[in-house]
Amino acid sequence: MSLVRLNIKGISYSQTQNGAYALILSEELGDRKLPIVIGAFEAQSIAIALEKEIRPPRPLTHDLFKTFADRYCIVIKQVIIHKLADGVFYSSIIAEQDGLEEIIDARTSDAIALALRFKAPIFTYKDILDRAGVNLKASPSGHDNPQADNAAIDELLAGSPRSSDQKTTTDHYNKHTLKELQELLHKALSNEAYESAAQLRDEISKRTL
């Protein structure tokens, strides 16, 4: 299968959903965009890496990984978004140490945050782009149309499953009481299901504000 190189176009914040962000990747030799829903922490980490003038007072998790890798002569060569299943993108980090390559499974948001720090290229397979790529509308002049882009991205964040990097809080949490949510949170933390735990914390926070 042929690989397609992707560039980072930017990050869009949903105007209608709190805490929802879309990372927009663009096809290097084409017009299609690949929107991927990511969490707030990952969006912040990617945004900081994109803005060279912003330096957090203490290293973020991805910065710490970069420092650790540099210390042990580990280099990230490339990131490949290799799978799309049940609305979730799966990625691999191709790393090298002492001339030996390793393939490491990673969440797409983490992989891209690291790719930025290592200046590593990002790829996906053509069939994934064919399935999940979108053509965001352009203005009559042929330039990008941010208003149309934001509307399309909000529609994506409102429920399109095909571009989710992580499963956001689902409707079935609405059926649980606050006590049941807290029990589910405790169970998720015990099982180290941290993504589910984050979703549950968000739902509990909304109800206790």
Image: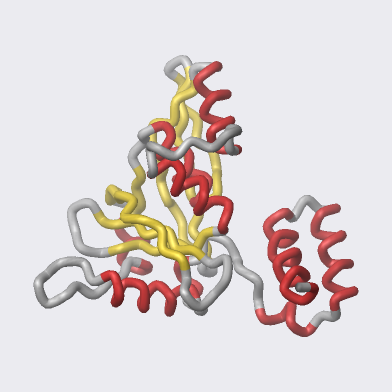
Q: Quadrant of the C terminus?
A: bottom right
State the image coordinates of residue 144 (x, y, percent, origin top left). Answer: 21, 67
183 left or right of 13 in image: right
Choose top left, top right, bottom left or bottom right for residue 175: bottom right
* Residue located farthest toward the left when viewing the structure as drawn: 141
Q: How many marks?
A: 0
Query: Is any atom of residue 79 visible in this view?
Result: yes
Q: Residue at x 55, y 45 (%)?
A: 106
In the rendered image, the vertical position of residue 34 relative to residue 118, given as above or below: below
Choose top left, top right, bottom left or bottom right for residue 200: bottom right
In the rendered image, the vertical position of residue 20 relative to residue 117, given as above or below: below
Q: Residue at x 72, y 54 (%)?
A: 194
Asked whether 177 or 120 is in front, the reply is 177
Q: Residue at x 36, y 34 (%)?
A: 119
199 left or right of 139 in image: right
Q: Residue at x 71, y 62 (%)?
A: 196
Query: Is any atom of residue 135 visible in this view?
Result: no
59 left or right of 133 in image: right
Q: How is the image coloured?
A: secondary structure
State the image coordinates of residue 103 (x, y, percent, origin top left). Answer: 50, 36
* Residue located farthest toward the bottom when viewing the structure as drawn: 175
Asked whether 204 or 89 is in front, the reply is 204
